[in-house]
Image (tube, rainbow, N blue to C red):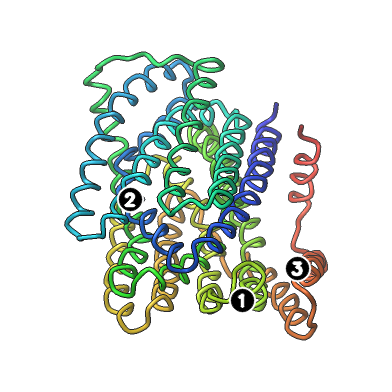
Amino acid sequence: MSTVRKLAKNTVVLIVSQISSYILAFFYTIYMARYLGAEGFGLLSTAIAFAGIFAVFTDLGLGLITIRDVARDKSLASKYLGNVAIIKTILAFFTFGLIVLVANIFSYPQQTLNIIYLIALNFIFSSFAYMFQSIYQAYEKMEYLSIAQILTSFLMFLGVFIAIYYKFSIIGFAFIYLIASLVVLAYSFIICIWKFALPKIEFDWSFWKYIILEALPISLASIFALVAFRVDTVILSLIKGNLAVGWYTASYRLMEALMFVPSMYAVAIYPIFSKFHITSKESLKLSYKKSFKYLSMIGLPIAVGTTLLADKIIGLIYPTGFTESILALQILIWTIPIIFLNYVLGASITSINQQRATIRITFICMSINVILNLILIPSFSYVAASFVTVITELTLFIFYFHLISKYIYKINIPRVIIKPIIASMIMGLFIYCVNLNLGAAILISTIIYFSALIFLKSFSKEDVYLFKQIFKSK
């Protein structure tokens, strides 16, 4: 199978699975929020954010290095699995102990502590599942990863439905996360040893030194990034309480649900970037340019459309207790076009072995995020957290773009985004002037946007060829 067809197949498979997963996640999140209310939903979100900050210590970049190196040499799969499994076991005990220590220092109520512990175990089991799934990605067999994603969302959906039917307490919802992660871990392990490789358990100290040093820049960058994008929830909970967290998280989850496109595209393109870095610099440059262009075209209209339709979206999805989430969504949605590009930039940086440069970048972003949240949240609550999230993503983009411009190619941003901006403005004018129900507004505005892109001749002959390859791929 050609590289273009393989990329197209993997991207389509992952997008289909992500759409399925996010549809399920969309509904179980709504039902959970409606059942728990803004304050209960905020409490659970606080636990997820708090444990999630420390969850980075369960992987520390080992998964990405495994994907990169095994993608280049498949014979390394067993060695990586065995050694990484031992390292992760050590990291898991360290992570859980750290979570227990810090959570008690913060003097959270006992109920909150219990929920944090259960969510922490969920992150630990998910990390081990990701270790096995990294082998699927290295082999570019994304269908197995897709099944794992759908299975996770299905188990969560089923668990939430059962919890609501039997009127579980909030602790019961935390157990659902734990059970789902255990089942997915079992699936990931079975598929890995059946289809790909058996772990070769060994203590290869020289290998440990190599992989830890290679992963160290990614791990530090991941720590800084996670603190930057989860600490707002923790600060919000400590200063303003769980109700403000519930309003903020309701909008944040909707924004997060849209990130499946860049995240799955990055998962599919990362092994390709890694190989092209070794085999063909021109192919790497072309892949990067096209990725930047396509994701720009997708992200901009989402931000414009959601800003204008935020009241209808929140009103449809959440009960009246969440009306404060409208403004948060209108602000947060502008992270989408930036995040879309940051996913591709991040994958590009790691694929060309420049991950060390991200340490300073993510540290700066983390510092800006924490300082601004501490200054602004006491006065402006969840609105401040929303603005700071956009500022942080924009800062990350500026640094990432500068880095990639030095090592791969410097894209002329105005030239790339001017036509999508014009098309988005035309679409936005239609939404503003015509009062339609939400479904009709989304459908017709999407048609108007892509029609405007075609009228503006946004697609070249090269794009048409690539699209044909995607539709031909199986």
* Residue type marked 2: Ile
Kindly tell me whether residue 453 is visible in this rendering: no
Residues under labels 2 and 1: Cα distance?
33 Å
Sort mark 1 into few (<14), some (14-19) or many (20+) by Cα contacts within 10 Å.
many
Sort mark 3 into few (<14), some (14-19) or many (20+) by Cα contacts within 10 Å.
some
Q: What residue does disc 3 label? A: 442
Asked if residue 351 lies left or right of residue 59, the reply is right
Q: Which mark is residue 116?
A: 2
Residues under labels 3 and 1: Cα distance?
12 Å
Closer to us: 17 or 93: 93
Residue most toward the front?
A: 166
Image position of 149 with respect to 368: above or below:
above
Q: Secondary structure at mark 3?
A: helix
* Residue type marked 3: Ile
Q: Which quadrant holds residue 319?
A: bottom right
Q: What residue does disc 1 label? A: 307
Residue 278 percent location from the top left of the image? 48, 32
Kindly tell me whether residue 343 is visible in this rendering: yes
Asked if residue 151 lies left or right of residue 121, the reply is right
Q: Earlier in the sequence, mark 2 or mark 3?
A: 2
Q: Image point 67% across, 45% down: which residue?
A: 20
* Residue type marked 1: Thr
